[in-house]
Image (tube, rainbow, N blue to C red):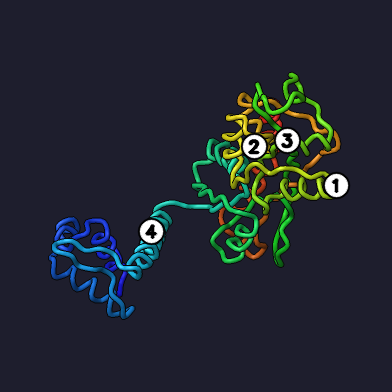
């Protein structure tokens, strides 16, 4: 069984016909049948039920379709990367959120035509794993990573920001032009929060627990843009960060929550054994020089 067999299999899934799949792929129908037989023989199970001129996926076929789609997609991605690597110089930079790395990449590329910065946004644990395995050259994380042989440098501090709809009707306290709440007031508010692996979320949960304040989590989001979208609809109070929220400042109203001064340090890191990788230390030095300026520009919006 080969990747080509999987591509043929997915074409049959899409067209629900061996002959139609053959026409789409510009190969013979016998080649299509041979690919399907190879897959069924490999797994010793039937992938399709044949009814008239059409074929329908079995339960095994549905499982195979999902896995094949992922494998073919990854293979295409790998081929694209390999071809790209042969044509241009790339530096793979990962970050826990898109705002910092996108702003930094834009400024760096304005001044440097090489290397091309490839951006990867993942959770902190995934970033560390990808750096350790060599998939990434540099990572930007919202806490100092714990990994042997790592060079980590502090680049800025990110503060939490509580936000609501500019004309929020959720609670009378939110109707003021510049709302000021006590920590206990959040007990009566629906909260829009990041996923539990997010640093600001962890700090918020710890703060509420330490002060014995129960709260209602209205929504959990894997990105700040999801929180902004929910705030746009006045579904709750969002917990974002200065950096992420300032870029969308026109969409919401900031809230001061007394006793909730949440912040975390941001680090840029790379493996010491890779410090001779072309452009790696140059990019890190650039980040150290410019992230604070980018941060101040955003938070003054």
Q: Earlier in the sequence, mark 3 or mark 1?
A: 3
Is residue 36 visible to us here?
yes
Question: In this rendering, is residue 80 above or below 107?
Answer: below
Seen from the viewer's position, the closer of residues 294 and 259 is 259
**Residue 217, percent from left and from top:** 68, 44
State the SS at label 3. Answer: loop
Q: Earlier in the sequence, mark 3 or mark 4?
A: 4
Residue underneath mark 3: 189
Alpha carbon separation for disc pair 1 and 2: 28 Å
Evaluate if marks 3 and 1 touch, with contact meaning CB atoms under 8 Å apart: no
Which residue is at 19% across, 67% downward? 50
Question: CB atoms at circles 4 and 2 under 8 Å apart?
Answer: no
Tag in front: 3 or 4: 3
Residue 85: mark in rendering: none
Left or right? Give the position of 133 relative to 84: right
Mark 4 neighbour density, 10 Å: few (under 14) some (14–19) many (20 or more): few
Which residue does the numbered mark 4 point to in the structure image? Answer: 73
x and y, in percent, of residue 83 in the image? 37, 57
Q: Earlier in the sequence, mark 3 or mark 2?
A: 3
| Residue at numbered disc 2 | 244
Q: Alpha carbon of mark 3 to alpha carbon of mark 2: how far?
A: 22 Å
246 or 151: which is nearer to us? 246
Mark identifier at residue 212: 1
Residue mark closest to the camera, 3 vs 2: 3
Of badges 1 and 2, the one in the foreground is: 1
Q: Residue furthest top?
A: 177
Kindly state the secondary structure of the residue where label 1 is placed: loop
The crowding category of the residue bearing disc 1, from other C-alpha atoms within 10 Å (few below 14, some 14 to 19, many at least 20), is few
């Amino acid at each position: 069984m080969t990747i080509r067999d999987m591509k043929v299999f997915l074409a049959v899934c899409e067209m629900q016909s061996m002959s139609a799949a053959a026409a789409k792929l510009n190969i013979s129908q016998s080649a299509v049948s041979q690919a399907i037989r190879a897959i069924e023989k490999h797994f010793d199970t039937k992938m399709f039920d044949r009814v008239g001129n059409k074929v329908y996926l079995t339960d095994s076929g549905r499982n195979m379709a999902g896995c094949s789609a992922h494998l073919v997609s990854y293979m295409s991605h790998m081929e694209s990367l390999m071809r790209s690597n042969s044509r241009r110089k790339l530096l793979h930079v990962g970050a826990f959120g898109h705002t910092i790395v996108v702003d930094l990449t834009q400024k760096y590329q304005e001044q440097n035509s090489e290397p091309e910065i490839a951006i990867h946004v993942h959770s902190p644990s995934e970033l560390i794993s990808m750096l350790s395995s060599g998939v990434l050259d540099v990572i930007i994380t919202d806490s100092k990573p714990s990994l042997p042989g790592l060079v980590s440098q502090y680049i800025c501090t990110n503060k939490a920001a509580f936000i609501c709809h500019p004309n929020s009707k959720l609670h009378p306290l939110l109707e003021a032009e510049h709302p000021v709440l006590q920590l206990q007031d959040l007990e009566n508010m629906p909260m829009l929060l990041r996923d539990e692996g997010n640093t600001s979320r962890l700090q918020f949960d710890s703060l509420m627990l330490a002060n014995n304040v129960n709260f209602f989590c209205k929504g959990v989001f894997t990105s700040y843009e999801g929180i902004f979208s929910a705030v746009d609809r006045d579904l709750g109070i969002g917990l974002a960060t200065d950096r992420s929220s300032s870029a969308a400042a026109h969409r919401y109203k900031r809230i001061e929550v007394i006793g909730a001064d949440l912040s975390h340090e941001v680090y840029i890191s790379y493996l010491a054994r890779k410090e001779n990788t072309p452009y790696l230390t140059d990019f890190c030095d650039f980040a150290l020089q410019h992230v604070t300026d980018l941060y101040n520009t955003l938070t003054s919006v």
